[in-house]
Amino acid sequence: MSARGRLHGAIDVVVTEVVELNSLIKRFHFARPDGKPLPAFSGGAHIIIQMQDGDTLRGSPYSLSSSPLDTRDYQVSIRRDDQGRGGSLYLHREVKPGMKMSITHPSNMFALDKRASRHLMLAGGIGITPFMSQTAQLAQMPGVHAELHYGMRSRELGVYLEELASRLGSRFHVYADEDNEQIDYDRLLSSQPAGTHLYVCGPSPMIDLVLRKSAEHGWPDNHVHYEHFAKASSGEPFNVELRASGKTIEVGAEQSMLEAIEAAGVDAPYLCRGGACGQCETRVLSVDGELLHEDHWLEDDEKASGEKIMPCVSRCRGTVVLDR
């Protein structure tokens, strides 16, 4: 695929609305140009938004915050990241109503477990977005209990507070750092009835803390669900040899390895493009330098072995040869 090509399974859409929710977060609405419904999805799903940022074709994952019950449009709420590679900056600065774009079909690695009769949800910051679609889905499931705890730096930076309060009533709890309010994880995780499922999405330190405490309190692994996308970071340019394809490419400073592989016309599998799903896992044949692992998929011993890499988010300092 060329730098101006398309991601796998891309859907042509038009931006119908851009809403500024606060000083850092905007909501973007996408619809088909012909007005037909978009593909069905379930609460917790995400899409990849394709962005032609200069000469670089980017594909970034964002959780759907709209209701699965209404697919006339998709909505994503995106926090501007001034320290990122530019995906959120591009969306905030360049994307306007009427603009034509491409997105992928929804994928879901953070789905509600329908076997559970009780759901404990913990959100931090922009991690509230997948819970918007999940709570909309749960609103149509009578008898299923959902309890949501939402932490944020300040109430000004919180989003959807009134909507969530309307959906959940007394089962919605808000905590603001500016008011010295904190989620009491130990109390929550030690007081749930058997059969409860736990869902967490937010900053990496929050997710790591909740996963550690849930293990300490004896939660079964299959009752704990989390969404933990990594960001493809910037870095020094480096070279990648694609042994099976017979190509050697350079990965730019603001480009991910996966983006460079795609721009070279080589198809590579992906699902999340955030180092969480394992779909783009690639065998490393050799490396002259250092692999810089940024994913949440490989175990520490796998990273240390230097035999695998996740090109969607990880980089190299030097030259790496891949079985691709």
Image (tube, rainbow, N blue to C red):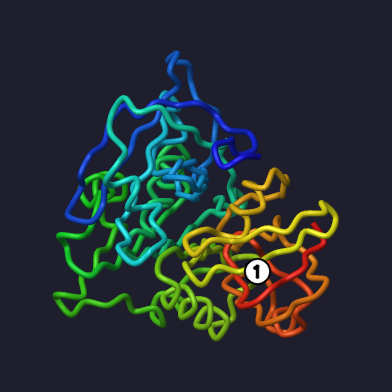
Name the side, left or right, on which 99 lies relative to 1.
Answer: left
**In the picture, residue 301 is in which quadrant?**
bottom right
For residue 228, say whether it is visible.
no
Local crowd size for mark 1, using a 10 Å CA cut-off: few (<14), some (14–19), many (≥20): many
Residue 83 lies, in percent from the top left, at: 34, 67
Which of 177 and 35 lies nearest the eye of the viewer?
35
Residue in the image at 39% along x and 31% along y: 30
Q: Quadrant of residue 155?
A: bottom left
Farthest-out residue, right: 244
Q: Is residue 269 above or below residue 139?
A: below
Q: Residue 26: give x, y in percent of width and height.
A: 26, 46
In this rendering, the answer to whether 180 lies above or below 56 is: below
Quick one: quadrant of the C terminus? Answer: bottom right
Residue at 53% x, 40% y is 42
Q: How many discs mark residues in the rendered view?
A: 1
User: Which residue: 22% across, 58% down?
Assistant: 158
Residue 55 seen from this side: yes
Q: Residue furthest top?
A: 34
Q: Nearer the viewer, residue 97 or 322?
A: 322
Q: Position of residue 11 (x, y in %)?
A: 54, 29
Location of residue 82 by image quarter = bottom left
Q: Tell me where residue 305 appears, x and y as whole percent.
A: 77, 83
Secondary structure state at the residue bearing disc 1: loop
Q: Is residue 249 left or right of residue 165?
A: right
Q: Name the foreground residue: 223 vs 282.
A: 282
Quickly name the residue at label 1.
297
Residue 60 located left or right of residue 14: right
Q: Is residue 301 above or below residue 100?
A: below
Q: Which quarter shows the N terminus?
A: top right
Name which residue type carries label 1. Answer: Trp
